[in-house]
């Protein structure tokens, strides 16, 4: 067996074979959903098709989309395709706006999830002699337990630190010899800051080699900062509660997109406005079908994440399609003075400056007829202490870069280190005070 792969045969399957398997599984899953869920049956009837009408790859486009509202309208478990008896575990999104999305797993779904998380971790280089420190939140959130199952699947030592208590986490990583860190990218930045203030040098005091970061969009610049500050190789992870949580796709050592595990998920990209299917290489909204789930499968689920698919074989030898790093959710896209902007674009613009720390906040308001757009960003410790620093020159260069990337010119506020509140889970990067103001 080739030591580079968790499952050599599946991960390197020729694309034609992979696509044939996907079509077969899609047809089976469509029939399964139609027979076991009144919600799906209704969708098929409204589209005047039956699962038998899906014969070729292009017929898949006839199947109606599943959307987040389907989960909310049928809260908590109206989309379930099995009896309640067959559910062995439940997870849920945070549901900050309205009903949360509930994910229900059968024993079979749990086996698949564990296998895909193990495959994902293995793809980034995690092996049985690793110590995996997991700082994703444990509990209803899929992050903590998803990585936990995967690391155990690989046979590594798991430290289930969960989120919070940052100083203790640094101590645990040092004392227990963590080699792999799993958390949100913003928490990795916070950990690096805490190490600095605790006088812990990650390169000499820790054994960290790699980090697996996800659950929020992050730019290449943040990757560079995390890799530099923690002395590790950073990998992007993608997943969502509607599909299983993490384990949908992962970066390999080539770092040129995230391999989607296509023996379990069918990925498409669509034009978010028209719903029309796009070709690989065209940027659009990601749509996923869970091909093997039994508890709560989804057919053509619209993720609202914007990405692009690449089906050329990767230099790592894997044939599974890659999705480009997600720039942001279409939900998160900000409309500022009529211009569409992702917070990650602002992040990309400001993170290239060594004079700045990784903490920023975008503040939008509408005090009168027009939007105001302010970017607050913290100075790095060194820059804040440097009496020679030319702040007005720095501001001018930052504004120039933001303008080049977004076409907008915000008000810029350089603030002291530590002035922007930290979060121990997902970062809050946007404060939009415009709601309700017209
Ligand atoms: Zn690869």
Image (tube, rainbow, N blue to C red):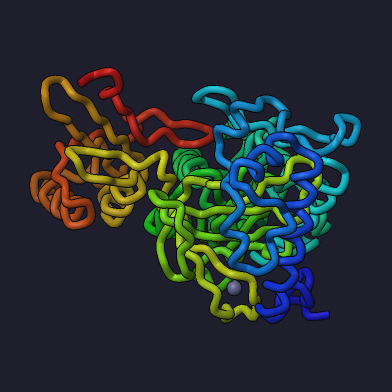
Residue 190 or residue 25, whichever sits in front: 25
Residue 373 x, y percent position in the rendering:
19, 34
Q: Quadrant of the C terminus?
A: top left
Which residue occupies 12% across, 28% down? 370
Relative to 221, 61 lies left or right: right
Which residue occupies 73% across, 29% down? 77
Point out the residue furthest to the right here.
85
Ligand 1 shown in quarter: bottom right
Which residue occupies 65% across, 76% down? 318
Q: Quadrant of the N terminus?
A: bottom right
Residue 340 or residue 301, whichever sits in front: 301
Which quarter of the figure has residue 435? top left
Residue 37 x, y percent position in the rendering:
76, 37
Residue 88 or residue 383, whichever sits in front: 88
Rendered position, 392 above or below 248 = above
Which quarter of the figure has residue 340? top left
Residue 395 x, y percent position in the rendering:
14, 46
Residue 304 x, y percent position in the rendering:
47, 45
Relative to 260, 325 lies left or right: left
Rendered position, 238 above or below 363 = below
């Amino acid at each position: 067996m080739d030591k580079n792969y968790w499952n050599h045969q599946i991960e390197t399957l020729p694309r034609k074979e992979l696509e044939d398997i996907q079509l077969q599984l899609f047809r089976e899953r469509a029939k399964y959903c139609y027979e076991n869920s009144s919600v799906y049956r209704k969708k098929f009837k409204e589209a005047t098709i039956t699962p038998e009408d899906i014969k070729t790859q292009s017929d898949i486009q006839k199947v109606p989309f599943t959307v987040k509202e389907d989960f909310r309208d049928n809260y908590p478990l109206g989309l379930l395709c099995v009896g309640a008896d067959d559910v062995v575990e439940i997870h849920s999104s945070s549901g900050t706006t309205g009903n949360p999305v509930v994910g229900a797993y059968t024993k079979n779904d749990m086996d698949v999830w564990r296998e895909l998380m193990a495959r994902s971790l293995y793809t980034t280089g995690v092996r049985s002699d690793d110590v995996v420190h997991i700082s994703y939140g444990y509990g209803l959130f899929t992050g903590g337990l998803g990585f936990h199952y995967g690391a155990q699947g690989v046979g590594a030592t798991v430290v289930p630190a969960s989120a919070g208590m940052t100083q203790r986490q640094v101590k645990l990583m040092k004392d227990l010899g963590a080699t792999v860190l799993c958390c949100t990218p913003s928490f990795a930045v916070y950990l690096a800051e805490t190490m600095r203030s605790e006088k812990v040098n990650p390169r000499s005091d820790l054994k960290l080699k790699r980090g697996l970061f996800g659950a929020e969009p992050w730019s290449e610049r943040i990757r560079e900062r995390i890799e530099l500050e923690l002395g590790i190789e950073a990998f992007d992870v993608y997943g969502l509660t509607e599909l299983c949580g993490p384990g949908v796709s992962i970066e390999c050592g080539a770092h040129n997109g995230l391999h989607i595990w296509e023996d379990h998920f069918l990925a498409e990209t669509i034009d978010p406005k028209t719903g029309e299917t796009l070709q690989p290489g065209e940027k659009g909204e990601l749509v996923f079908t869970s091909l093997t789930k039994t508890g709560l499968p989804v057919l053509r689920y619209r993720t609202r994440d914007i990405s692009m698919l690449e089906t050329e074989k990767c230099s790592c030898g894997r044939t599974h399609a890659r999705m480009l790093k997600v720039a942001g959710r279409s939900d998160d896209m900000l409309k500022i003075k009529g211009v569409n902007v992702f917070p990650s674009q602002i992040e990309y613009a400001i993170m290239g400056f060594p004079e700045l720390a990784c903490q920023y906040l975008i503040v939008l308001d509408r005090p009168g007829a027009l939007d105001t757009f302010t970017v607050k960003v913290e100075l790095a410790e060194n820059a804040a202490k440097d009496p020679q620093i030319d702040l007005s020159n720095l501001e001018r260069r930052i504004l120039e870069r933001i303008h080049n990337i977004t076409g907008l010119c915000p008000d810029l506020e350089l603030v002291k280190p530590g002035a922007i509140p930290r979060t121990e889970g997902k970062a809050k990067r946007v404060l939009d005070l415009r709601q309700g103001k017209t």
